[in-house]
Image: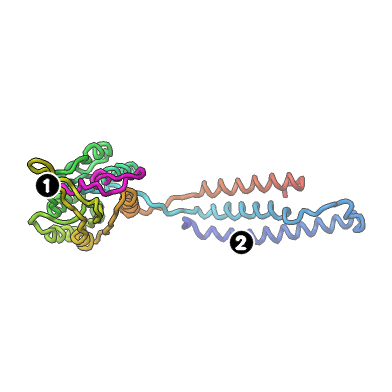
Amino acid sequence: MSFASPWLLLFLLLVPAAIVGYVVLEQHRAHRAERWSSGALMPNMVPSRPGFRRYIPLVLFLLALVLLLAGFARPQATVNQPREGATVVLALDVSGSMDAKDVTNLGGPGRTTRLLAARDAATAFLKDLPEKYRVALVTFGNRGIVKVSPTYDREKIVAALPTKSLTQGTGLASGIESTITVAQRAFGKPEPGQPPNPVAVLLISDGGNTEQADPATEIDKARKIDLPISTVLLGTNGPLAKIEQPIPGGTNEIQVPVQPGQLQDIARGTDGTFFQVRTASELKQVYKDLGSRLVQDKKKREITVAVAGVAILFLIAGAMLSGLWFRRIV
């Protein structure tokens, strides 16, 4: 908290003066009571002492006084606000291995596919994301595709989230290339003296590049334009990490364990963050963490009215208690 006119805080010196005045007033009352009554009769006239209650209204009045005097200095609170133009790019792996049913459901027991877990958590994330952020969607199998360009329309993103994986390999380089394309569009032309619009990328995959293109080249491009790419390794290495591949006369079961290596390299090489999750709930937490890391502007808001409102509440409470217990306001 800060103050627009901090020198006015000198008025807080009135608080000690008020305490001294209260003590003098109480002593004056005591002396006056002694002049008009006998000390031996006082126990009969005052059957019980108020004890600590006598100080509660005083404390409330003093708190109100402190807040009112502090209000003269126009207190300001620093708050975080989503920066206008910030963009989140969701990049989802839709390769065949994402059809492995080894991820715990978001809503309870049971298993779901890696892709559906990513879709469900993304949907929940979009509901909580501030409206000032734009969102783009990229999918990648053998190659990356920009499904939805940066938009404020959350329903458009949800409708475009894939529900079925493709019988393709994983082209991480192509996926990163597509996110770079989206990011460069989203950066826009900044105002003079202002940084470009911030972009955050979250790439979700089970790892393992199966295409010839080396992701290292695209990692270097992302680093040059200051594009952080956070990566999520989704899935397990257990017996459920498998898919069924159709073959003539039936199906063939293929193991598809997760491969963290290249996803770690992507995050490390672009100053992003690497996450490894095995359940839809863990993935939802990753989305939540991303939301808290997004670029925000710090702005000061004057809270004089709020401070004065609390001070009035203290005054009312102190007056009511003093009137109820002692039949007087002060």
Side of 249 where 116 appears, left or right: right
| Residue at the disc numbered 2 | 13
Query: Can residue 50 be found in the magenta stretch?
Result: no
Quadrant in which residue 38 is drawn: bottom right
Q: Residue at x 54, y 49 (%)?
A: 307
- Name the kind of residue labelled 1 in the image: Gln
From the viewer's perspective, tell me whether residue 242 is left or right of residue 43: left
Residue farthest to the front? 249
Helix, strand, or loop for circle 2?
helix
Disc nearest the viewer among 2 and 1: 1
Q: Position of residue 272 (x, y in %)?
A: 25, 59
Q: Position of residue 231 (x, y in %)?
A: 24, 55
Disc on the earlier residue, 2 or 1: 2
* Residue topped by disc 1: 168
Q: Is residue 82 above or below residue 154?
A: below
Residue drawn 72% across and 56% down?
52
Number of callouts in the render? 2
Q: Is residue 261 visible?
A: yes
Q: CA distance from mark 2 to mark 1?
A: 74 Å
| Nearest the eye: 46 or 176 | 176
Estimate the x, y position of residue 74 in percent, counting from the top left: 50, 53
Q: Which three-letter amino acid code belongs to the residue tagged 2? A: Leu
SS type, badge 1: loop
> Where in the figure is residue 318, as x and y percent of width and height?
67, 48
- Foreground pick, 325 / 3: 325
From which residue to which does the magenta span run?
A: 96-117
Numbered tag placed on residue 149 in the rendering = none
Residue in the foreground of this view, choosing between 101 and 155: 101
Q: Is-magenta flag for residue 114?
A: yes
